[in-house]
Image (cartoon, helix red, strand yellow):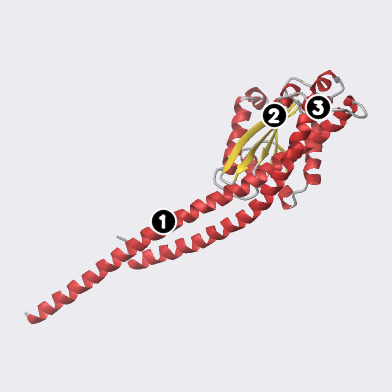
Amino acid sequence: MANLKEIRERKASVASTMQITIAMKMVSAAKLKKAQDAIVRFRPYAEKLQEILASVGDSLKDDEDNQFAAQRDKERILLVLITSNRGLCGAFNSNAIKATIHRALTQYESQMMARQVDFIAIGKKGADFLRKKGYNIIYDGKELFDELTFERVASIASMIMGLFTDGEYDHVDMIYNRFKNAGTQILTEEQFLPIEVDNLAKKSGTTSNVDYIFEPTKEYIVQELIPRSLKLQFYKAILDSHASEHGARMTAMHKATDNATELLKELSLQFNKARQAAITNEILEIVGGAEALKG
């Protein structure tokens, strides 16, 4: 059994760590409220835009000039990995990273062998991992979370759209965590480009045909809506991941605090047992000494 000094030092260390986890949990809870409000307010707008695009799906199919829906052979692949800049959030980052690598090595195995798969890493954790493994990162967006605004996110989305329309890449996927609630993050892998016209209705959840009146023309509106929709889709993924990060960190710090509390109880029990044993030994030594003096 450890001596009293060792147990006392361990208790102090655990108590200090618990104070940190409690503080981090409170900070994450405050940040989560703001991030959650942002994604909850934004989702209806993004979903309604997807619904409108789904209703004009026939125009998307018939429009030969729709460069964002151009289906090409998947020779050059771009994977967009969205993680966080900081850790201590459970499996939040590792799940997204593992899913990205698994997708690259299985779905795009031949392209990986030909070194035709590149990455965009939004978040320091994902960028550090990909760079350590030697994967080619064409853009590192870790500074994006320092000031998360639609304008900054839209500029990255425009860059990706430009790379696709210029023929630099034939296919673009996004991997991120979608926010459900503070305790649940849903790992999501979705195609960003080209636009999947047949799946627009499924994505938007449209179950019935809505008769919209278009002005000036359906084709013109489609050409205006597609770039805006792609930027909004990318922004929604960033907001989802941002809220998921704080939810995951709050949950992780809550569990860490509970574990520290249990550990403190165990250490207190060990400390009391060790102290009682020490006291008992001292009494036995005194009694033995007294008996020896009598003899």
What kind of element bears circle 1?
helix
Q: Residues within 10 Å of mark 1 (few under 14, many from 20)?
A: few
Q: Amino acid at mark 3?
A: Phe
Write down the residue under mark 3.
Answer: 68
Q: Nearer the viewer, residue 292 or 239?
A: 239
Q: Residue at x 82, y 31 (%)?
A: 226
Q: Amino acid at mark 2?
A: Gly
Closer to viewer: mark 3 or mark 2: 2
How far from the left and from the top, in percent, is residue 251?
54, 49
Q: Along the horizontal axis of the image, is 255 left or right of 233? A: left
Q: Gap in Å between the C-alphas at discs 3 and 2?
A: 21 Å
Write down the residue under mark 1.
Answer: 262
Residue 189 visible in the shown view: yes
The quadrant holding residue 141 is top right
What kind of element bears circle 3?
helix
Q: Is residue 77 above or below residue 147?
A: above
Quarter that holds the N terminus: bottom left
Residue 160 visible in the shown view: no
Quarter that holds the C terminus: bottom left
Q: Gap in Å between the C-alphas at discs 1 and 3?
A: 55 Å
Marks 3 and 2, the one that precedes in the sequence: 3
Q: Are marks 2 and 1 in contact (CB under 8 Å)?
A: no
How far from the left and from the top, in percent, is residue 143?
73, 49
Closer to viewer: mark 1 or mark 3: 1
Marks 2 and 1, the one that precedes in the sequence: 2
- Say the numbered circle drawn on residue 205: 2
Q: Residues within 10 Å of mark 3 (few under 14, many from 20)?
A: many
Q: Gap in Å between the C-alphas at discs 2 and 1?
A: 46 Å
Q: Residue at x 81, y 27 (%)?
A: 68
How far from the left and from the top, in percent, is residue 174?
69, 34
The quadrant holding residue 212 is top right
Q: Along the horizontal axis of the image, is 177 left or right of 18? A: right
